[in-house]
Amino acid sequence: MIKGVVVIASVIALLLSGCKDKASQGTVELKRQTISGLTTQVIAPSKVTDFYESTGTVKAKTVSVVSGRVMGVVKSVTVKEGDTVQKGQVLITIDDSDIAHKVQAAQKAVEVAKENRSLIDVTYKRYKNLHDQRAISGQEMDQIETQSKIAELEYQRAKAMLAEVQTLQGFTQIRAPESGVVTAKKVDVGHMAIPGAPFLVIESTGEYHVETHVDEGLLGQLKRGMEVEVSLEALGKTVRGTIKEIVPSVDPQSRTFLVKIAITGPNIKGGVFARVKVPIGAREALLVPEKAVVKRGQLSGVYVVDDKGLITYRLIRQGKRYGNAFEVITGLKTGERVVVEGADMAIDGALLVSEQRGVK
């Protein structure tokens, strides 16, 4: 019985020995794919200017809402949305026939009042002579003086009414209050113009500003004249801006305050979304070039190369963008080497046999 147990144990030992030899042979025979021509770079901390990022909207320096002051039918509209207009240019004409009738009536009223005043004046002079000769009483003289004053008041009131309706004639031509671009048109030929109702919206060109709301924690750090970076993604451009106004009142709901940033440049449009970067200090950060970052779905990573040339795909957590580089918050350490050129050709688990060293 004991001999049988010994034999079985010997057989098991031989089998395990054979498996170990095969496993050892398999490890030795493992061949990794080799890659050449990649450029790597040793990652080291870089000094960067830290910034606070917020969003806002581009607005024109002047936005004019054009409306009318008289009622009437719109006879003509000479502009459309997108047109450039000059200050004083006639934009809309309103039918003035009703006002013309009022002017004629006012002119007639002035003539009647003037004639009546002249008649009263003649009577007054006659009564004055009689009063001087003591031919009429003082009461009669007071009555004619009152009539003379009333006639004068009626004449002046008629003249004022005429001037008012004549002024209305000038309001039948709606002119551009400022030079700019028509951004909204709310009236057409045949519409009834109502006093105070908006007809057009005109935005000035050349001078714009961005309105953005900034966290209250920066209330004491921002100053007028400070330069910031403004990215206009819809227009594909980034411009420099200057803080021109700070409204120190903090919104109790959002805990932010309003900042207005002046910007200039060609082809800027009002209403465009803007991303603002406000510098708030300097610090050190671990940066990798944007072209070194490889996306896999929603994940971001880089290819790390060790001292033996083994390439490994490493997931990272990206931070802020600084120019053409991203800050790495987690996933990399100072001194590690990453592929910065040819990352699209790198393979996880492959060996890099020939490389070019990038300069940090």
Image (cartoon, grey):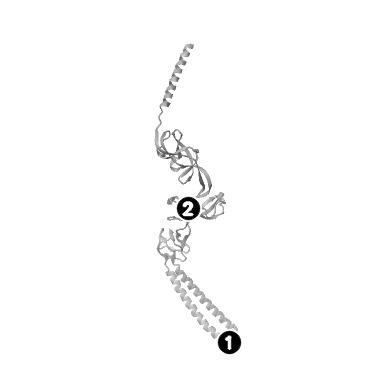
Q: Looking at the image, which is closer to me, 182 or 53?
A: 53
| Residue type, numbered disc 2 | Arg
Q: Residues within 10 Å of mark 2 (few under 14, many from 20)?
A: some
Residue 97 location in percent, x, y? 42, 69
**Residue drawn at (43%, 52%) of the image:** 235
Query: In the figure, 21 relative to 214: above or below?
Result: above
- Residue 141, can we see it? yes
Choose the circle earlier in sequence order: 2 or 1: 1
Q: Nearer the viewer, mark 2 or mark 1?
A: 2
Residue 269 location in percent, x, y? 44, 55
Q: Looking at the image, which is closer to me, 352 or 312?
A: 352
- Residue 185, can we see it? no
In the rendered structure, find residue 74 and report the number of the disc placed on it.
none
Q: CA distance from mark 2 to mark 1?
A: 86 Å
Q: Which residue is mark 2?
A: 240
Q: Looking at the image, which is closer to me, 136 or 208?
A: 208
Q: How many marks?
A: 2
Q: Residues within 10 Å of mark 1 (few under 14, many from 20)?
A: few
Q: Which residue is mark 1?
A: 132
| Residue type, numbered disc 1 | Asp
**Residue drawn at (47%, 11%) of the image:** 3
Residue 155 location in percent, x, y? 51, 77
Q: Secondary structure at mark 2?
A: strand
Residue 251 location in percent, x, y? 56, 52
Query: In the figure, 309 relative to 143: above or below?
Result: above
Q: Secondary structure at mark 1?
A: helix
Q: Quadrant of residue 205?
A: bottom left
Circles 2 and 1 in contact, beta carbons < 8 Å: no
**Residue drawn at (47%, 53%) of the image:** 240
Query: In the figure, 197 relative to 111: above or below?
Result: above
Q: Quadrant of residue 203?
A: bottom left
